[in-house]
Image: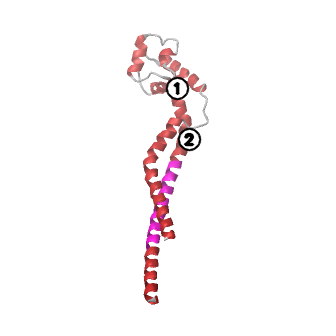
Amino acid sequence: EINRLEAALFDQRKTAVERFERKKRDAEASVATHSKVRQQYQSDLREAEQDSRRIQMEQHLESFLIRRAKLKGITTERIFLALESFGIETANDVDALKTTKVPNIGPVLRDRLLDWKNTVASKFVLKQALPESERNRIASRYAPVFLPLIASVEAAIRDIEGYAAS
């Protein structure tokens, strides 16, 4: 009877150890995937922070409309319509004049616009933090990946704790 009970206990222990090891491997795979995704997320966040200056500069320049600039020689509706027809409406768009010929915009007006854009850009003050909109955009891209991974790791921990208790 003792031998039979010992054999049954040994079989139970062997089965429990196998389940535990299988669950442990699954959990380790989930943790490895989570680590890899987290590294990608951190990399994207660092890249976005490096691009933060460019992003903030673009937002700053977008807030300055050519129509409100009051530049010498750029006052008629005809000139505004010519610029707008080429998508040049803000200080951020002015660089397009370097490669695009716009009717009624000669080298003098082009240079005035480029100088105006450079003046606007020189007044730019960099904020320390990454814009919240960019941080949220990156986080929303990774949330659908992180949530299932976290849930699977939490489930594996509960299962392993259950095996340990039994």
Q: Position of residue 13 (x, y in %)?
A: 46, 78
| Prevailing SS of the magenta stretch | helix
In front of the other: 11 or 140: 11
Name the residue located 46 percent from the left edge and 88 percent from the top edge: 2
Q: Categorize mark 2 by other alpha carbons within 10 Å: few (<14), some (14-19), many (20+).
A: few
Q: Position of residue 26 (x, y in %)?
A: 44, 64
- Mark 2 residue type: Gln
Name the residue located 51 percent from the left edge and 30 percent from the top edge: 58
Residue 103 visible in rendering = no
Calculate the distance from the C-alpha at mark 1 to the C-alpha at mark 2: 18 Å
For residue 16, side relative to residue 126 (left or right)? left
Helix, strand, or loop for circle 2? helix
Say the numbered circle drawn on residue 50. 2
Magenta residues, start to end: 18-42
Q: Position of residue 153 (x, y in %)?
A: 48, 59
Magenta stretch: includes residue 32: yes
Point out the residue furthest to the left here. Answer: 85
Q: Position of residue 119 (x, y in %)?
A: 58, 22
In front of the other: 136 or 97: 136
In front of the other: 127 or 142: 142
- Mark 1 residue type: Leu
Q: Work out whether mark 1 precedes mark 2 in sequence or the reverse, and give the earlier one.
A: 2
For residue 16, side relative to residue 120 (left or right)? left
Residue 52 visible in rendering = yes
In front of the other: 67 or 104: 67
Say the numbered circle drawn on residue 119. none
Quadrant, the N terminus: bottom left
Magenta stretch: includes residue 35: yes
Say the numbered circle drawn on residue 61. 1
Q: In the rendered view, tell whether residue 153 sits above or below residue 7.
A: above
